[in-house]
Amino acid sequence: GQNIDQPTEMTATEGAIVQINCTYQTSGFNGLFWYQQHAGEAPTFLSYNVLDGLEEKGRFSSFLSRSKGYSYLLLKELQMKDSASYLCAVKDSNYQLIWGAGTKLIIKP
Amino acid sequence: DAMVIQNPRYQVTQFGKPVTLSCSQTLNHNVMYWYQQKSSQAPKLLFHYYDKDFNNEADTPDNFQSRRPNTSFCFLDIRSPGLGDAAMYLCATSGGRATDTQYFGPGTRLTVL
């Protein structure tokens, strides 16, 4: 079966750095996506990785290792508005998006 | 701004009373998706259209139907909503099925009484 694993919940302090990990086992790989979802709202696209390495976008970076089936999302200089769920999703060989259940990130002052 | 719009944002219906949710997009994307998402769970794909080509997920109940009359609009019909169908319904679009990013509308929160 296909599987995406992420921690259920993480807590971090405003101004700090947090790393949210994602491991995946899918039939094929056509890219990995990170989305941010605030409570009661729709997911918004954050990043896309298809090759190994780090993609940086402002305060957010995403890393991929295809050989390890592993990705992480790194959030720097945390702000209160970063409190949200972060969903990892992988496109499999049929180009279907396989979703993780999301990591709820709680930011404390 | 190009976007994905869903109406209504909140829908309340009674058990067994049919309901239709709508989605429109100004992105001119070929692919439109409907997802169901329950609290603290991953979005679950119900079906998608690639242009007019309809693709139903194997485990999507027959109670859920969809229509795409043109490129811009897509509808989700729930023929006889049950209490278990209360959820957020998300519409998404992408330029192609391959590696293109999916962009989501704001969602419709469905309550079944």
Image (cartoon, coloured by chain):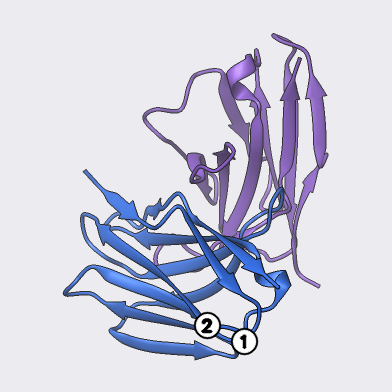
Chain colours: A blue, B purple
Tag 2, which secondary structure? loop
Q: Position of residue A6 (x, y in %)?
A: 38, 58
Label 1 chain ID: A
B112 sits left or right of A101 in the view: right
Question: Disc 1 residue type?
Answer: Glu
**Residue under pointer 2:** A17
Point out the image quarter for the N terminus of chain A: top left
Q: Who is closer to the viewer here, B1 or A68?
A: A68
Question: Disc 2 residue type?
Answer: Ile
Instruction: Compare marks 1 and 2 and give the one earlier in the sequence.
Output: 2
Q: Position of residue A14 (x, y in %)?
A: 66, 78
Residue B76, compared with residue B51, is above or below; it is above
Q: Position of residue A40 (x, y in %)?
A: 71, 48
**Residue under pointer 1:** A77
- Residue for point 30% across, 58% down: A92
A78 sits left or right of A88 in the view: right
Q: Who is closer to the viewer here, A107 or A72?
A: A107
Q: Who is closer to the viewer here, A17 or B36?
A: A17
- Residue for point 35% across, 61% down: A91
On the question of residue B95 being in view, the answer is no
Q: Position of residue B66 (x, y in %)?
A: 60, 32
Using a 10 Å C-alpha cutoff, classify the residue at mark 1 as few (fewer than 14 neighbours), some (14 to 19) or many (20 or more).
few
Q: CA distance from mark 1 to mark 2?
A: 6 Å
- Residue for point 72% across, 72% down: A80
Residue A99, compared with residue B60, is above or below; it is below
Contact (Cβ within 8 Å) of mark 1 with mark 2: yes
Q: Are marks 1 and 2 on the same chain?
A: yes
